[in-house]
Each structure stands twice: as structure tokens, then as C-alpha cells.
């Protein structure tokens, strides 16, 4: 089984070496802004008592407690106790952005990865909250997204997934909505043999902002607003998708990644995040690779 897998991967590497790895234009119907500057500095801290949101630049403000269940589900907490890694290790850094009604959107992220061993497993989550500075109040911004970034081996096949986030006013109501782009390197079992992985990217899905947070609105699936921004990665410089793709195909360019017969987007329509464009350009110039 292992020899067949090595041969399959070797064939893919040879085939991909023959292609010209172009930098894809990505989704471009709207104008893309640079990743937004932080509107206010926040930090997430944790201790035996739970999580808190702190304001290092505003010492007069008291830390706000963040309910644990907003960040970690009981199911994920139980699963993490039986795993070598924990997707519940949240980064201290919190990204913030204005949403148009006086509140701020907060982006929190976690990630953990095996540093040794053949499994090379990793997992993490992304969570969004809303902060009202007038009331000094936190609220849950988006329902549980689950594990948003992950990698691991399945019967010798290296799989991975990642999620990217956009901000923009998709319904033109003056409020900032969240775009969610999911991508995967999927393994498929056929005839008792694991094939792949194959790269797939889903069309951007939009969660529209209301008084009670962001809610998915399928009417805007696959669309882009006139202007949008990307939210930067937190605590990592590349995703599990980039990590696995580079190990398999020695390139960060999705135009050279292997896709399956049921791919959800044509190569010319793929969203290519800014950090990945940077990795591609750095690879072209012989620079260092990103790490996570």
C-alpha cells in the first residue's frame, strides 16, 4: 500500500513539474482593499478562571469576561483531551474592524500542530465576536464555525482544510458583512485504495450583519461587493492547505495543485489570499517559505 502511494505521489510531482504555475488573478469582480488596519487593540488572556478580553492601550477599561462556550464547544473540549493536539489554544492577538453601526467586529483564532511524528496533525478554529464600546459589552457575533483549519493523514493520504475571511458590504445596507471561503485537500477511497488529495474550493459564502450578529444569507453565495478586504491570518503565516500542498507539489500556486473530477470552481475563479500571493512571489524569487 505504501509503495503504491509513493508511486502515485511521485507521478503527481513529475506531472506538476511540467506545468507553468501562474499566479491566478483570483476573484476580482470587486475592488480589493489591503487588509484593514486594526481599529483598536485587544488581547485575549486565559487562566484557571476562563478567558478575558483585555485593552492594553486603554488601561482604564476593565477586562471583559468571554464565556468559554463562545470559544470552545463541550464536544471539542472532550475530543481535545484524547488528542495529541488541541484546537483550543487561542492566540493572544485579536483583530478588530469597524462594522458600521458603532460596534467592532473581533476575530479570534486558535491553532495547534504536531512538531514531530508521521501524522503531522494540526487543527484550529476561528471565532467572531461583537464589541459595543459605548456599553462596554461583548456579544457572540457568529455561530460556531467548528474546526476551520486542519491537517492530518488518512490511510497514508495527507488531507487538509482552511478557511479565509473577507469583510465587505455585500447587501449594501451600510454594515460590514463576513465572507467565508472554505478550501480542502480531500482524500477519496475507491477500490480499497486512498486516492488524492484533491484540491477543492467552495464559492464565497456571505454572513450578513444584523443586530444579533452575522447570519448566513445564501442569496449572495459566490458574489463579491464593490469593495472588500481580507482578514489576515492570526498566529500563523500559512495554513494547513499551504503546508500540505507544498510538501506534495513543492509550490504554493493553486494552479499547480491536483484537482479532482468534482472540483467546485474553475482555476480562473479561485480566490487566492494575499499572504499566499506573497508566498508564491517569494518562492519565485528564491526567498524563505512561511511557517506555522
Image (cartoon, rainbow, N blue to C red):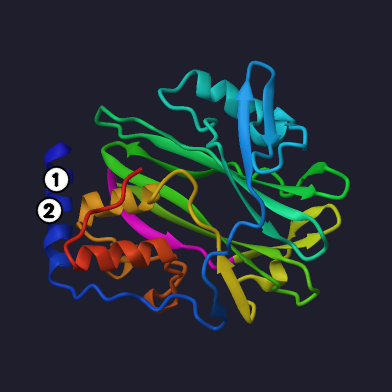
Tell me, yes or no, whether the highlighted magenta stretch contains residue 192. no
Mark 1, Cα crowd under 10 Å, few <14 / some 14-19 / many 20+, is: few
Residue depicted at 74% across the width and 62% down the height: 99
Seen in the picture, residue 137 relative to 233 is either above or below; the reply is: above
Comparing 171 with 9, the one in front is 171
The x and y percentages for residue 121 are 36, 34
Number of numbered discs:
2
Residue depicted at 38% across the width and 50% down the height: 237
Q: Is residue 20 left or right of residue 64?
A: left
- Say which residue label 1 marks: 6
Region in magenta: 193-204
The x and y percentages for residue 112 are 43, 33
- Say which residue label 2 marks: 10
**Residue 38 image-quadrant placement:** bottom right
The x and y percentages for residue 252 are 29, 61
Residue 217 visible (yes or no): yes
Which residue occupies the extreme top position in the image? 48
**Residue 249 image-quadrant placement:** bottom left
Q: Is residue 68 left or right of residue 254?
A: right
Amino acid at each position: 500500500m505504501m509503495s503504491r502511494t509513493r508511486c502515485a505521489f511521485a507521478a503527481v510531482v513529475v506531472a506538476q513539474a511540467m506545468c507553468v504555475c501562474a499566479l491566478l488573478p483570483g476573484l476580482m469582480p470587486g475592488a480589493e482593499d489591503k487588509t484593514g488596519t486594526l481599529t483598536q487593540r485587544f488581547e485575549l488572556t486565559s487562566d484557571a478562571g476562563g478567558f478575558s478580553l483585555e485593552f492594553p492601550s486603554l488601561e482604564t477599561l476593565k477586562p471583559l469576561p468571554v464565556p468559554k462556550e463562545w470559544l470552545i464547544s463541550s464536544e471539542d473540549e472532550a475530543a481535545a483531551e484524547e488528542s495529541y493536539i488541541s484546537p483550543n489554544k487561542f492566540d493572544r492577538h485579536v483583530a478588530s474592524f469597524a462594522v458600521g453601526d458603532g460596534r467592532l467586529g473581533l476575530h479570534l483564532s486558535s491553532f495547534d500542530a504536531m512538531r514531530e511524528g508521521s501524522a503531522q496533525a494540526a487543527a484550529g478554529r476561528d471565532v467572531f465576536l461583537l464589541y459595543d464600546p459605548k456599553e462596554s459589552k461583548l456579544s457572540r457575533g457568529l455561530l460556531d464555525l467548528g474546526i476551520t483549519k486542519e491537517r492530518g493523514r488518512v490511510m497514508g493520504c495527507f488531507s487538509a482544510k482552511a478557511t479565509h475571511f473577507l469583510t465587505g458590504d455585500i447587501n449594501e445596507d451600510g454594515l460590514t458583512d463576513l465572507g467565508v471561503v472554505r478550501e480542502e485537500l480531500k482524500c477519496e477511497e475507491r477500490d480499497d485504495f486512498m486516492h488524492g488529495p484533491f484540491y477543492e474550493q467552495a464559492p464565497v459564502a456571505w454572513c450578513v450583519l444584523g443586530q444579533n450578529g452575522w447570519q448566513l444569507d445564501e442569496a449572495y453565495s459566490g458574489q463579491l461587493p464593490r469593495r472588500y478586504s481580507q482578514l489576515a491570518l492570526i498566529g500563523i503565516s500559512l495554513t494547513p492547505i499551504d503546508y500540505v500542498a507544498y510538501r506534495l507539489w513543492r509550490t504554493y500556486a493553486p494552479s499547480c495543485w491536483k484537482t479532482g473530477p468534482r472540483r467546485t470552481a474553475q482555476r480562473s475563479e479561485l480566490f487566492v489570499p494575499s499572504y499566499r500571493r506573497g508566498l508564491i512571489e517569494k518562492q519565485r524569487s528564491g526567498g524563505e517559505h512561511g511557517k506555522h
